[in-house]
Image: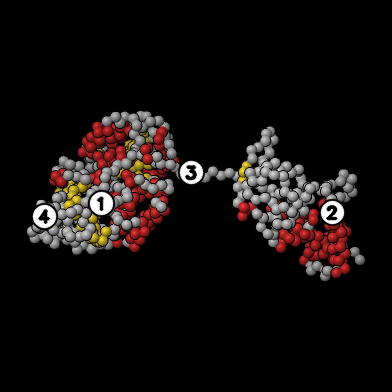
Amino acid sequence: MTDDRDPLDLLKAGLKAAPPPPDPAARARALALAMENFDRLQDSTEAARPKEDRPPQAGFLNGVRSMLNFLTTRPALAATTSVAALIVGVAVLLPVAQKLPVAPGQPPLATPAAAPQPPLPEASSLAQAAPPAPDTPVATGTVEVPYPAPAEAAPKVVVDMPEAEAAAPAADATLDYLAEASPRLRREAPAGGAEILPEVVAAPSVEPMALPQLDPNTEAYATAEANPVKVTAEEPVSTFSTDVDTASYALVRSTLNLGVMPTPDQVRVEEMVNYFPYAYPAPEAGQAFRTTVSVMPTPWNEGTRLVTIGLQGALPAIADRPPLNLVFLIDTSGSMEDPMKLGLLKQSLALMLPELRPDDQVALVAYAGSAGEVLPPTRAAEKDKILAALDSLAAGGSTAGAEGIELAYKVAAGMTAQGEVSRVLLATDGDFNVGLSDPAALETFIARKRDEGIYLSVLGFGRGNLDDATMQALAQNGNGTASYIDTLAEARKVLVDQLSGALFPIADDVKVQVEWNPAQVAEYRLIGYETRALKREDFNNDKVDAGEIGAGLQVTAIYEITAPGSKALKNDPLRYGAAPAADGTADELGFLRLRWKAPGASESQLTETAITGREQATDDTRFAAAIAGFGQILQDSVYLGDWGWDQAIALALDARGDDPFGYRIEAVNLMRLAQSLDR
């Protein structure tokens, strides 16, 4: 009886049905026939190939169509299922089998011979002899792989293969089964019995990314010899100018992230300490800033103590600030042609624009071989116009820095009205090479403009030719700040989070003076502030310039002091002199004096505070001590003894405290990186 159902439906039903039980007799006959064919084909030396006189109906698709036409019974459909599964299995396993390793003693699996295989190289770097004899394991080590080219012989690619990797691992059970039961997957060995080597393909060559190399002779840093230990009986007074710059810390971070240890002249400890915010008490109403003092044992010297002096600037209401006129003075010389220079500069200044008021004004001045005004004074509300002008900047030419500074001050003066604040923001790598024949004259020019009320701040970008010394000198003479921008996150910290502090001062010419009591303090040293040192008489001289404190900014200074009779004393007592006795103040460690001017004022104000030694330390002051230790380790300081990276990291972690922006844990990770690089 003929089944009139569609053959595809019958095939589908057959695929879902269980296969018929195997016939033991049929299985035995099939196995015997397979073994007979296997033995007969062992002596064949030619691969099977298509015949021109094959039957008319030959072909894979014709065969499938014929099978579907004639196979109608359930057993036949089940048999068809088995054949289809075998075809699919061979199609899937065949490509995989080409890449499977060959077990020792087993012949390699064959691949279809679509094209003649290129001859093996006559010699390799490891084996120069003839091909191995039968049963000889494949040589291990270095293999040269030829790559033929159409026009000329291609160069040989040498692939280093460690012996452990070159030796073929033992085949698993599946590979054994395929090797024994599938002779059609086996490539026939050439005459002579030499084993066919597996095809070796060299991976594409990938050049490792090279880190920038820093040449110490191409960068200049503002530095000085570390402060020495002073004998109180000989020099009881220490005087210095405040410093709110943070460029050194960002510079150290940039160097470490390049995989290089910073040189000691890159490190200014006070700028590393001042990089971090501390929870100092805010000033009372009407005060410009407030002083906080703490005393703690020195982590690296148990015979001394650390006295930390913190100044917290007042933060006026943002709504009360005066209108701002800002001139971006942008270095577009050829040395700025780098994504981490001009590219990062554009992104950084773009972050700042939303922080400005709509009625604030912005102008752009660019300088290269010559200076020019790229954007005339424009209201900050016209953000698209300002961004388009920024985006149009391109690097090229030499660096006429002096000419650019003169033009920027001229533009700023033209923007200024009564009661407004005007600032010049110089963005550069510091590579001034044209028009700076008289640096002293330029500093005098900037100082004169400072006295007229136009301050200059500097943003440094890039590495390789960074002139940190010039940027520090310009910022100090311009009553501004110096920052180094190595990441967009740092740009946000400087130009967004600390914008008010950078552009709106609350105290000018801030000077610090500490008189130490020789009855309590035999020796002392100021950690950092070497480039900000002042003479004792400069403290009372209002003509002497000093640092500024911006709105909401902080200043931290740390002294290490040693008591009389301590084993940690560095100097022997004088034979013909003795420490003078203190009248009525024997219990005081010292006396702190601060002098500053209100912005625009010509006369200074004075505040005084006694240092008793009973002031308690906090996590903030302990963390500041860890950062001071970090900087001194980088400077290879002689005052640390055996105190090193492990102790600095442990102290920073223990005193980390509140760290909402992750600055402190970043410092810990930088210490760990420096520890690894320092080995």
Q: Count up the numbered dots.
A: 4
Q: What residue is shown at x 23% (from left), y 39% (from top)? A: 450
User: Answer yes or no: do the residues labelled 2 and 4 have beta carbons within 8 Å?
Assistant: no
> Which residue matches tag 1?
527
Calculate the distance from the C-alpha at mark 2 to the C-alpha at mark 1: 89 Å
Identity of the amino acid at label 4?
A: Ala
Residue toward you, 158 or 525 = 158
User: Mark 4 or mark 2, which is nearer the start of the sequence?
Assistant: 2
Question: Which disc, if any, is residue 210?
Answer: 3
User: Mark 1 or mark 2, which is nearer the start of the sequence?
Assistant: 2
User: Mark 3 or mark 4, which is nearer the start of the sequence?
Assistant: 3
Residue 367: x %, y % from top left: 36, 33
Residue toward you, 363 or 523 = 523
Secondary element at tag 3: loop
Q: Quadrant of the N terminus?
A: bottom right
Q: Nearer the viewer, mark 2 or mark 1?
A: 2
Question: Which disc, if any, is residue 578?
Answer: 4
The answer to whether residue 429 shows anywhere in this view is no
Calculate the distance from the C-alpha at mark 3 to the C-alpha at mark 2: 57 Å
